[in-house]
């Protein structure tokens, strides 16, 4: 077993333990489990950082050229972004939604080939790491927005029905969740926009054209318009609360389709086969 694969499995194991602690903390209402989950998650993220660096050094390129690498990088960006939001909002409950998603990405990654791919020469460009880093950070921020949206809808439903479960008292307030949604939009939208622009510049150097209506480019543009509409609605029409939460969830579902659906089911220049030159 290579050092990188060993580190990957250690990271997966630590994320699994953190997820269990989060879920036990939610079900049992024991604060100790939730606080332990945060520290365990930080430990897992530290190991994950080493995993990413080792993989990057061994392949000589940002590790997103295969599905295995991309899933790991996505999970890394997701956990790192969540920890930043935890530092800002101290919302332990958010981790109960984000950590299972990161764990799921890692588990799916174990079913993909971990062999270092033979990279396509077109990846030999500084625009490649810039593009993918911006894109994955944008994905991670929008995942936080979707999780905040789900929590908003859960709490709003309990308030309207006047049926309060134990979960209600551990969720952030509706105002906090709505503020988190807006913060994610103000950070995630520029990241996504810069990711698309840097991708266009990279595409021009790699394929000789800024935009080729590749399936991934098309779906990324559709998703961009969804978030642009949400930002426009918030700034000019006053969209808040339930509507903003629903659109944030829909936008993230489209992001997941763009990532999984296009890479796995649709052929195009963004497929991993083209990245690895196979």
Image: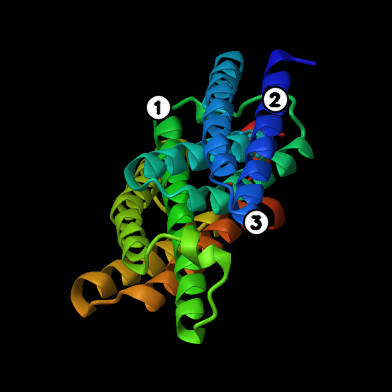
Q: Describe the element under mark 2 as helix, strand or loop.
A: helix
Q: Position of residue 254 (x, y in %)?
A: 53, 64
Q: Which residue is mark 3?
A: 27
* Image side of residue 131 versus residue 36, left or right: left
Residue ranking furthest to the bottom: 161
Q: Split into 4 quadrants, where in the image is the N terminus?
A: top right
Label 1: few (<14), some (14–19) or many (≥20) C-alpha neighbours in 10 Å: few
Label 2: few (<14), some (14–19) or many (≥20) C-alpha neighbours in 10 Å: some
Rendered residue at 66%/49% (across/down): 24
Q: Which residue is mark 1?
A: 126
Lower sequence index among marks 3 and 2 = 2
| As drawn, 183 above or below 70 | below
Image quarter of residue 113: top right
What separation in Å lies between label 3 and label 1 (alpha carbons)? 46 Å
* Image side of residue 4 versus residue 95, left or right: right
Lower sequence index among marks 1 and 2 = 2
Viewer-proximal residue, 2 or 275?
2
Q: Which residue is mark 2?
A: 10
Rendered residue at 60%/38% (across/down): 70
């Amino acid at each position: 077993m290579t050092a990188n694969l060993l580190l990957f499995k250690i990271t997966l194991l630590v994320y699994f333990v953190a997820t269990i602690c989060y879920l036990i903390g939610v079900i049992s209402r024991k604060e100790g489990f939730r606080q332990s989950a945060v520290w365990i998650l930080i430990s897992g993220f530290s190991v994950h950082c080493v995993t990413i660096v080792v993989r990057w050094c061994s392949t000589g390129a940002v590790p997103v050229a295969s599905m295995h690498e991309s899933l790991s990088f996505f999970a890394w960006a997701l956990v790192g972004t969540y920890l930043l939001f935890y530092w800002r909002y101290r919302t332990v409950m958010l981790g109960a939604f984000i950590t299972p998603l990161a764990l799921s990405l890692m588990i799916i990654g174990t079913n993909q080939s971990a062999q270092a791919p033979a990279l396509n020469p077109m990846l030999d460009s500084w625009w490649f790491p810039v593009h993918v880093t911006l894109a994955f950070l944008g994905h991670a921020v929008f995942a936080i927005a979707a999780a905040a949206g789900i929590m908003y809808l859960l709490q709003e439903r309990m308030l309207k029905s006047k049926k309060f479960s134990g979960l209600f008292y551990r969720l952030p307030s509706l105002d906090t969740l709505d503020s988190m949604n807006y913060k994610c939009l103000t950070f995630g939208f520029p990241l996504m926009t810069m990711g698309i622009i840097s991708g266009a510049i990279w595409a021009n150097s790699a394929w000789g054209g800024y935009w080729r209506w590749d399936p991934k480019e098309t779906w990324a543009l559709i998703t961009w318009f969804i978030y642009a509409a949400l930002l426009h609605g918030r700034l000019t029409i006053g969209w808040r609360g339930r509507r903003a939460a629903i659109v944030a969830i829909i936008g993230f579902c489209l992001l997941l389709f763009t990532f999984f659906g296009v890479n796995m089911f649709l052929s195009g220049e963004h497929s991993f086969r083209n990245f690895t030159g196979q």
